[in-house]
Amino acid sequence: MPNRSAGLANKTLAVYVKDLRLELRTRYALNAILMFGVTTLAVVSFAVGQTGLSPKLLAALYWVIMFFSAMSGLSQGFVREEETGTALALKLTADPTAVYLGKLFFNFSLLSTMTIIITPLFFVFTDAPNDNLAPFVLILILGVIGLCGATTLIAAIIAKAAVKGALFAVLSFPLLLTLLIGLISASQKVFDGQTIMEIGTDLQFLVAYAVIMITGSILLFKFVWQE
Amino acid sequence: MWWKILLFIAMSAMIVISFMTPAPQKMIGESSRIFYYHIPQAWLGVLAFLMSMVYSIKYLMNRRQADDDSAVNAARLGFVFIVLATVTGSIFAKVTWGSFWNWDPRETSVFILLLIYGAYFALRGALDVEEKRAALGAVYSIFAFVTVPFLIFVVPRMVPSLHPEDSIVNSEMKFSMGPIVRMIFFSSLALFTVLYFWMFNLAQRVQRMVRVQMELED
Amino acid sequence: MDGNYIALAVTLVVWIGLFFFLMSLNKKVKKLEEKIH
């Protein structure tokens, strides 16, 4: 058993490194996701002005920006495999769980990078209260895991379809709306100055969501991958 | 055959009684009669979704075309019922609270359920190979259903409700049902469920005939 | 009370219409099924 799990970890790492190398060479997904994030952020902050935004509005704006950025870049992983025809080779050499986990970690890295760049800009542009950062960072980490956990399987599904871009958002949105409600509720409380203990219920929800989505994805992924 | 006549008589009687007895909720008044119709529709929307997911699991396990057809039929009927529930609920909201849509927790959940159904049909429309459509549709259906417990149990506690505690939406399970109201409500629930299964059965048989027709033409 | 009668009439008409539509559909499907067997 330890042997097999070591094999899985190695294969996962192999898929992850392959994607990372490809991404570092082309920077296709990162550019798309970053530019989309910055543009949305600029539009939003330009439209609503700088000061006097309520915590609720700030939290909603932040996660709207995150959602749209995620939608623009996270589908790339599988679409690229299908379009360049490398999916078949991957299918023969790696087992589905390793492929899924590799892609999940890759998406997680991608979205994390974007978050690290966008979030300071968000605070600069909107003048959001930045004296309560520790719980906010925790929410961010859980949010990014949740976003990736739900969308990686969807990306695999839409890679097989004829119209890819629009379908990704259409399929992801109903699943992510639940997560976004939780994220907005938690972020709002943090902007209001609440501590980690006070937002415990929201954090539990975010953890439960991520765990369920990733477990569900691992169980279902092989059915998508075999098609 | 006999049960159809029975259903016809019982449903007609239920409709007449539901309008002839005093309104179920005195404070809201006459418009509260919509609960005899609205809640069974919402219930069937969720039940159909559950059935669609169960058939999807069966499809992924056995790869039988018939299971996929059943999943689609259940989803189609569920979509109709959830649209009906949304429309009746929205009209009721307009009459009672003054606006068609308030983003009440239950409205939010029903909206997400509608979007899931919509996305499911959009996905199936975008796939042209039959086996692919069936398998990926099944995966999406199961994956989407996983979020439903969150919609029912968690979201209502997180979204601030616009309505005061005593409003019927937040406490509809608790609203004091007299024996007559209870009887009408549960018979309506049962009759709508029978109606749903009849419609489902018909949809299944029509689908089967379409398949046979297609095979004959080939 | 008048509104109630109107609503009752409309609901009954919708239900009776649906019922007879389902019955006719049932008949058609049955005919097709018999033709095939």
Image (tube, helix red, strand yellow):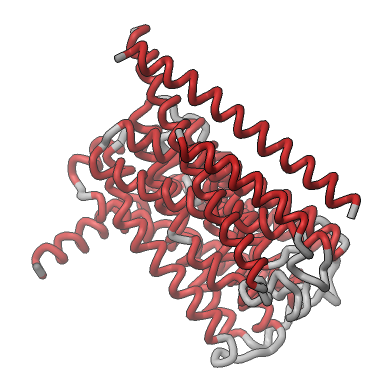
The C terminus of chain A lies in which quarter of the figure?
top left
Residue occupying the point 47% across, 40% down: B3
Q: Position of residue A136 (x, y in %)?
A: 59, 80
Q: Residue at x 72, y 40 (%)?
A: C12
- In the picture provided, is B170 more to the left or to the right than B77? right
Q: How many marks?
A: 0
Judge by depth and name the residue closer to the eye, B129 or B99. Answer: B99
Residue B55 placement: quadrant: top left
Q: Residue A175's x, y, as percent? A: 52, 56
**Residue under the image location 61 percent in, 46 percent down:** B11
Quarter-of-image position of residue A26? top left
- Whether residue A21 is visible here, answered yes or no, is yes
Q: Residue A140 at x, y = what percent?
A: 54, 73
Side of B141 relative to B165 (left or right): left
Foreground pick, C7 / A151: C7
Position in image of residue A92 (x %, y %):
19, 40
Quadrant for the N terminus of chain A in the image? bottom left
- Reply above or below: B186 against C25: below
The vertical placement of B150 against B195, above or below, is below
Question: Can you say whether B160 is above or below B124 in the image?
Answer: below
Q: Can residue A16 be seen?
A: no
**Residue B29 position (above or below residue B65):** below
